[in-house]
Image (cartoon, grey):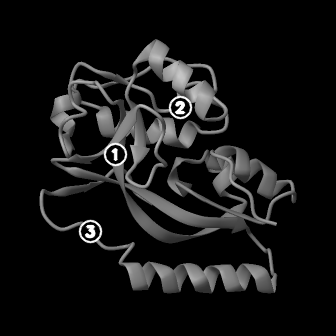
């Protein structure tokens, strides 16, 4: 059974408890105690983006240079116990650039809640370029440099199962076919953190 939930930290605890077999996310962002019981394989360096209200001053640009976010507070999951690895990545990316990680916000479940929260706070959201479209918002790739979010396939050490083998093989094949572990062309890049 496959399902989508955000947060590798939450998934890691579920894997260690034997309730989940595998997940994807930023392995280096997990606490050492969690990493100790898990194995991982890099799958993708995912270009990062910012989700903006459609009338935000930066929304008209096709791309948003990181420097253009100076003075902004950008939501990156602060306070969400499922996603501290994402918030850590944001702190590393924003450090020294004059960009703040926005204060915790209520967890928005579904498009309607997200839309109400966005209309109330008007806070940009750190995302990836493939983030799904939301009403009255735009997703703009971050550039100068292009920050990359490292995504790994993660599983409990010692887990042996033909399904995991098939998943690992598919991840290797798809990464190679799509160039997911390559660096983007032009405008510079930055691996936002080590794997």
Q: Of discs 2 and 1, which sits in the foreground?
A: 1
Residue 108 x, y percent position in the rendering: 62, 28
**Image quarter in which the C terminus is found:** bottom left
The quadrant holding residue 162 is bottom right
Q: Position of residue 91 (x, y in %)?
A: 39, 33
Q: Earlier in the sequence, mark 3 or mark 1?
A: 1
The residue wearing badge 1 is: 49
Q: According to the image, label 3 marks what residue?
A: 183
Q: Residues within 10 Å of mark 3 (few under 14, many from 20)?
A: some
Picture quadrant of residue 152: bottom right
Asked if marks 2 and 1 touch (Cβ < 8 Å), the reply is: no
Percent from the top left, x then y, of residue 173? 51, 86
| In this picture, residue 25 sits left or right of residue 138 | right
Q: Which mark is residue 77?
A: 2
Q: On the rendered structure, is 169 left or right of 162?
A: left
Q: Residue furthest left?
A: 187
Tell me the distance, in whole angstroms, between the alpha carbons under discs 3 and 1. 16 Å
Disc 2 to disc 1, how far (Cα)? 15 Å
Of residues 150 and 118, the one nearer the viewer is 118
């Amino acid at each position: 059974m496959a399902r989508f939930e955000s947060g590798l930290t939450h998934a890691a605890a579920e894997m260690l408890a034997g309730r989940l077999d595998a997940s994807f996310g930023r392995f280096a962002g997990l606490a050492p105690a969690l990493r100790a019981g898990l194995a991982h394989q890099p799958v993708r360096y995912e270009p990062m983006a910012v989700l903006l209200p459609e009338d935000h001053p930066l929304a008209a640009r096709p791309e948003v240079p990181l420097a253009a976010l100076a003075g902004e507070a950008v939501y990156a999951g602060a306070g969400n116990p499922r996603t501290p690895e994402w918030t850590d990545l944001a702190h590393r990316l924003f450090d020294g650039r004059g960009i703040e990680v926005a204060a915790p916000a209520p967890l928005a479940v579904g498009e309607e809640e997200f839309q109400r929260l966005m209309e109330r706070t008007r806070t940009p959201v750190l995302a990836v370029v493939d983030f799904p479209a939301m009403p009255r918002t735009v997703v703009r790739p971050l550039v100068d440099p292009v920050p990359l979010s490292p995504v790994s396939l993660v599983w409990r050490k010692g887990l042996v199962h033909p399904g995991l083998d098939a998943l690992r093989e598919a991840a290797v094949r798809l990464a190679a076919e799509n160039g997911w572990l390559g660096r983007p062309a032009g405008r510079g890049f930055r691996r936002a953190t080590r794997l």
